Image: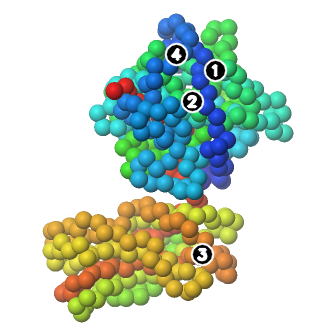
Amino acid sequence: MALFAVGMAQTPIRTRPILVPASNMKRVVPLFIQPIQKIGNKIIHVGPKVPYVENHHYRRIGNLIFDSYEGNSTNGGNPDVPTDGLYGETFIPTAPGNRWYFGDDFYCPYSVTHYTNVFPGQAGKDALGFDFVMHVNAATATDPNPQSVTVVDVVMSGDGFDVNNPMPPSNYLNGVELTYGAIAPGSFIYSNVDLTASPLPMPTSTNGWYAILFATGLDGSGNPIECPNAQPLYWGTKVLNPSVVDQYEYLDGDSSFGSQTGTADQLFTFQFGSYGTASDYTVTRGNEQGTHDVAKLQGTPGSDVVVQQALQSVLSFNNAEVTATIQLDPSVVVSNLTLLRGVVVAKANAIPLNDPSAKMVMYMKNNTTGAYDVVKTITPVINAGTDGTLIIAPSIPITNISKYINTNVSPPTVSLRFAVKHARPALLGWRLTINYMSVDYDTIGPDPLAPSLAFSTPN
């Protein structure tokens, strides 16, 4: 995971976040709740501060509006613990509920995150449920006297975003302020909040921002005093999650101690970033169309490796095949999940096919046995038109990859093989197109990361 500044020097903030086991997270409940409005850098209290009362409007009782929290409750249970796997994808199967943070010397008390989609039909509704996860940093040499968090503010904005002319949002809807007992330094907490007493208006479009601020308390004017040693815990978007966050996030400061100014105006990208690209490839079955050039596999869309397999006999399975070697960064410790990036397409040449025997298969070389093990078999719906297209999606999770990493060479490598399989005679053959080939071996989780929170409506 690398965080890069946008519109300024491209300096990584952190090379890698740190795993937080679910068992470390403790639930906290607000003491008070109050509606607020954000105007410029000021928080205006627009309603009374009232004792917090739970009416059980938890996120899974109603409809989710936006979700990078993934709670465990499917029936409105209490509490709704952070977990994993709601969308058919589990990034850390052995430890669901884990989240990520950037260490105790990462200072992010105020951030504004851009999202690009919400659940269908939920834009413009009032959120009556809110879940979030956060951390109060423990003492460090940089900050030996960390403070406690007692106030959390969250507000929404429906402002647009132009990556070519990036500007932070300036028009905010009403929000909500939550008052807690002291959340002490070193704490990892989650909170399932019933917003019945102070509904949170959502933007009417599906594209907007959420701002979250962690404070030690309020000043004499009622404005929150940022707790510098606080940060959200991070989760994010998955392919099958209807709500989508992109990589853009404005921070107050650059995440270093003392850099905060009270304004979230420093734009960063929170984007997956440790990749290995192909160093060579071999056409192991079929004939390459065009010049053999490994640059075609190094991340330039439209510059493809195309392999065509001619007439095959009945029941011939491997109808086109490419094997590539991916070099990894030797300084990175590779974990048990890899995501393949790129697009792999197989086509039957001008033959309408709708045959369930057609498959795309991905192999990895087992460095213990020397054999190529099948790690993914994709059986998509075949285009019933003229080309019988099969496509591998841009991100394919592969678990337990340690046996596939060749550490006897420097840099270490993995070997990937793609093949088209079909049980019918391919009368005019198949062709296999690889748009580019890249392995993401930084196994942090959803891409991109964002503060772990969710909004929901009642039944």
The image shows residue 271, relative to residue 120, as above or below, that is below
Q: Residue at (57%, 76%) from the top-left corner?
A: 404
Q: CA distance from mark 3 to mark 4?
A: 52 Å
Q: CA distance from mark 1 to mark 2?
A: 10 Å
Q: CA distance from mark 2 to mark 4?
A: 14 Å
* Residue 362: x %, y % from top left: 42, 75
* Residue 295: x %, y % from top left: 47, 75
- Specify the quadrant of the image occupied by residue 306: bottom left
Say whether disc 1 or disc 2 marks the residue closer to the N-terminus. 1
* Residue 313: x %, y % from top left: 24, 93
398 left or right of 456 in image: right
Residue position for label 3: 403
Q: CA distance from mark 3 to mark 2?
A: 39 Å
Say whether disc 1 or disc 3 marks the residue closer to the N-terminus. 1
Residue position for label 1: 180
Q: Amino acid at mark 2?
A: Ser
Q: Residue at (41%, 88%) from the top-left corner?
A: 284
Label 1: state its secondary structure.
strand
Residue position for label 4: 53
The image shows residue 406, relative to residue 215, as above or below, that is below
